[in-house]
């Protein structure tokens, strides 16, 4: 299953002495998941307030575990949206639309 995961910086402060190590760990974590196909793409917002990723998981629980493993997890609020294939969605919408009266 595919999911869109959005992160938004929260009010938990990043300890000054840990910042660089956390940023590097986050970069390596993302790089590894892009390489193994767990993530399809990852983007940061231009103002560095958070980001957006499209990824793959076999269950909601697997996705939750993966988010909790992200090195910078505590410093962000998270939103997750399950995704459907666009073509499939449009085919079903067309079928449904054709059943409408009038």
Image (cartoon, helix red, strand yellow):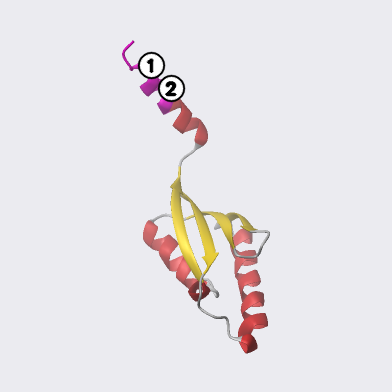
Circle 2: element type: helix
**Spatial CA span between label 2 and label 1:** 6 Å
Q: Which span of residues is magenta-colored?
A: 92-102
Residue at which label 1 appears: 98
Q: Is residue 97 magenta?
A: yes
Residue 23 lies in what quarter of the image?
Answer: bottom right
Residue at which label 2 appears: 94
Q: Is residue 32 above or below residue 53?
A: below
Quadrant occupied by the C terminus: top left
How many C-alpha atoms fall within 10 Å of the one at disc 2: few (<14), some, or many (≥20)?
A: few
Q: Are marks 2 and 1 in contact (CB under 8 Å)?
A: yes
Circle 1: element type: helix
How many C-alpha atoms fall within 10 Å of the one at disc 1: few (<14), some, or many (≥20)?
A: few
SS majority, magenta: helix
Residue closest to the far left: 101
Task: Estimate the x, y position of residue 14 in percent, counting from the top left.
Answer: 57, 81
Q: Residue at horizontal 56%, vertical 56%?
A: 53
From the viewer's perspective, is 60 left or right of 22? left
Task: Estimate the x, y position of residue 85 in percent, counting from the top left.
Answer: 49, 38
Q: Is residue 48 above or below residue 99?
A: below
From the viewer's perspective, is 40 left or right of 87? right
The residue lying toward the viewer, choosing from 39 and 100, is 100
From the viewer's perspective, is 28 left or right of 9? right
The residue lying toward the viewer, choosing from 11 and 81, is 11
Q: Residue at horizontal 59%, vertical 60%?
A: 51
Q: Is residue 53 magenta?
A: no
Q: Residue at horizontal 62%, vertical 59%?
A: 34
Task: Estimate the x, y position of residue 36 in percent, counting from the top left.
Answer: 59, 60
């Amino acid at each position: 299953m595919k999911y869109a995961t959005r992160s938004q910086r929260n009010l938990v402060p990043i300890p000054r002495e840990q910042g660089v190590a956390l940023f590097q760990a986050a970069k390596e974590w993302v790089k590894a998941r892009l390489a193994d196909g767990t993530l399809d793409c990852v983007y940061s917002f231009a103002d560095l307030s958070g980001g957006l990723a499209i990824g793959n998981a076999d269950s909601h629980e697997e996705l939750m575990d993966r988010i909790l493993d992200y090195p910078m997890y505590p410093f962000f609020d998270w939103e997750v949206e399950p995704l459907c294939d666009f073509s499939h969605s449009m085919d079903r919408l067309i079928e449904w639309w054709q059943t409408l009266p009038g």
